[in-house]
Image: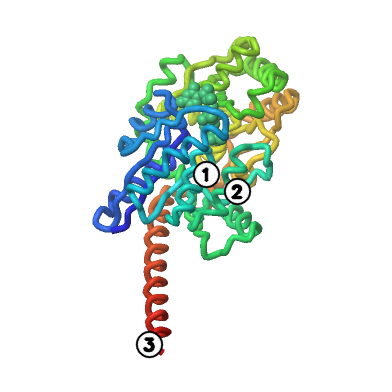
Amino acid sequence: MIKILNVVGARPNFMKMAPIIADIKRRAGRMSQSLIHTGQHYDETMSLAFFRDLDLPLPDVDLGVGSGTHAEQTARVMLAFEPVLLEQRPDWVVVVGDVNSTLACALVASKLGIRVAHVEAGLRSFDRTMPEEINRVLTDQIADLLLTPSRDADANLLCEGIRPERIVRVGNVMIDTLFRSLEAAKKSDILEVLNLQPRQFAVLTLHRPANVDAAATLRGIFSALGEIASRLPIVFPAHPRTQLRLREFGIEQPRGLMILEPMGYLDFLHLWSNARLVMTDSGGLQEETTALAVQCLTLRDNTERPITVEQGTNKVTGRDPARIIEAATEVLRDSRPAQTRVPELWDGRAAERIVEALLNADLEERAGERESGRAGELTESS
Ligand code: UD1
């Protein structure tokens, strides 16, 4: 029986982990799993709501680390995670994405000699000012099994000197959750509640430190949003960090921009999938809009998901207000449906491939151990 310890910590982890757990449960005779929540995200709207919407089992252990500086948060996760690992001694620790919890748990496991699998490996923005980029690069260096969503991710890993046998391209597991949730999301009444008609509104998410932590940048982005909102209402479920900064900097809510509390997965899926335009600085939403052919503007200078620009509906605008307005105007001018080519292996079956990769790596490891055992016996007897 292979024992898997799955780690989640922050909002974007939950939708990546849900299908992996479901697949492990289907193979109950061969594998078992336990779920650890680091507690990096802890508000009901940032955490528990997703467990309900995604049918995730409640965590077996909640480390309850909460917020802090990067060093505080990473260190607290490490301190709290180590005793859990020592007690559970799993065969694999599975971490997903690029948040502080991802790196912290990968580091602890790797130093204890417990194998680490990283789901969503190989993505690179090549922007080391982003905390997520540091988390990605370091996690990929220490993980034993690198499970990538796309070809560009494989290429990035190979360029960093990672051996090809550690890399398995499995596709995009978040798209598994997206496809599985479409029917349930249709039951959401969010459009009626907000009095919106399909394709007659835009959706915004904004929470990156580089966008919201400096008053001048956030003011600039909001001036652009005010201009766009005078033409098309914008719905903005706002991350707690952004709500705080808007209050701190005294930035007023432009007319036509609806600032709401963060939303659960199903309501939010129903909302953005009916939008005329999505504007975001999130990573996941760039991929989700590509999968469903919804126009997306990424309000950042770069993306670690270039495939969404090459094949999908994504345009990277930067944060210059004039450029954001121009890009939105271009989208609104063209009423034809967006063109998209859903990337290869974004087919709803990534979780299956992830779990198979774990099983195969385990078989190879055990075969290797048997081989070296036999070689040892031969050397001793010769
Ligand atoms: C984290 C991830 C980011 C991801 C984002 C999704 C890192 C480095 N960043 O950023 O990659 O895109 O999650 O949301 O791991 N807060 C609450 N309630 C919560 C959680 C956070 O109020 O449940 C507030 C706190 O004031 C906290 C701040 O949000 O200090 C930032 O939270 P944190 O987990 O440090 O980073 P995120 O900005 O959420």
Q: Is residue 173 above or below residue 193?
A: below
Query: Secondary structure beneath disc 1?
Result: helix
Which of the two discs, 3 and 2, sits closer to the camera? Answer: 3
- Locate residue 217, reporting x and y percent: 70, 22
Residue type, numbered disc 3 = Ser
Residue that label 3 marks: 381
Residue that label 2 marks: 137
Residue type, numbered disc 1 = Leu
Q: Nearer the viewer, residue 208 or 22?
A: 208
| CB under 8 Å between discs 3 and 2 | no
C-alpha span from label 3 to label 1: 44 Å
Q: Tell me what residue is drawn at x 36 percent, y 43 percent.
A: 84
Q: Earlier in the sequence, mark 2 or mark 1?
A: 1
Which of the two discs, 3 and 1, sits closer to the camera? Answer: 3
Colour mode? rainbow
Q: Quarter-wise, where is residue 242 in the image?
A: top right
Residue that label 1 marks: 103
Q: Tell me what residue is drawn at x 52 percent, y 65 percent.
A: 165
Using the rendered image of the protein, determine whether residue 271 is visible from the camera's viewpoint: no
Q: Quarter-wise, where is residue 201 in the image?
A: top right
- Locate residue 149, reporting x and y percent: 52, 50
| CB under 8 Å between discs 3 and 1 | no
- Locate residue 241, reporting x and y percent: 55, 22
Give the number of the disc on residue 162: none
- Dot 3 alpha-carbon crowd within 10 angstroms: few under 14, some 14 to 19, many 20 or more: few
Work out which quarter of the rendered image holds the N terminus and state it.
bottom left
Q: Is residue 113 above or below residue 54?
A: below
Using the rendered image of the protein, determine whether residue 83 is visible from the camera's viewpoint: yes
Work out which quarter of the rendered image holds the C terminus and state it.
bottom left
Q: Earlier in the sequence, mark 3 or mark 1?
A: 1
Q: Nearer the viewer, residue 164 or 7?
A: 7
C-alpha span from label 2 to label 1: 9 Å
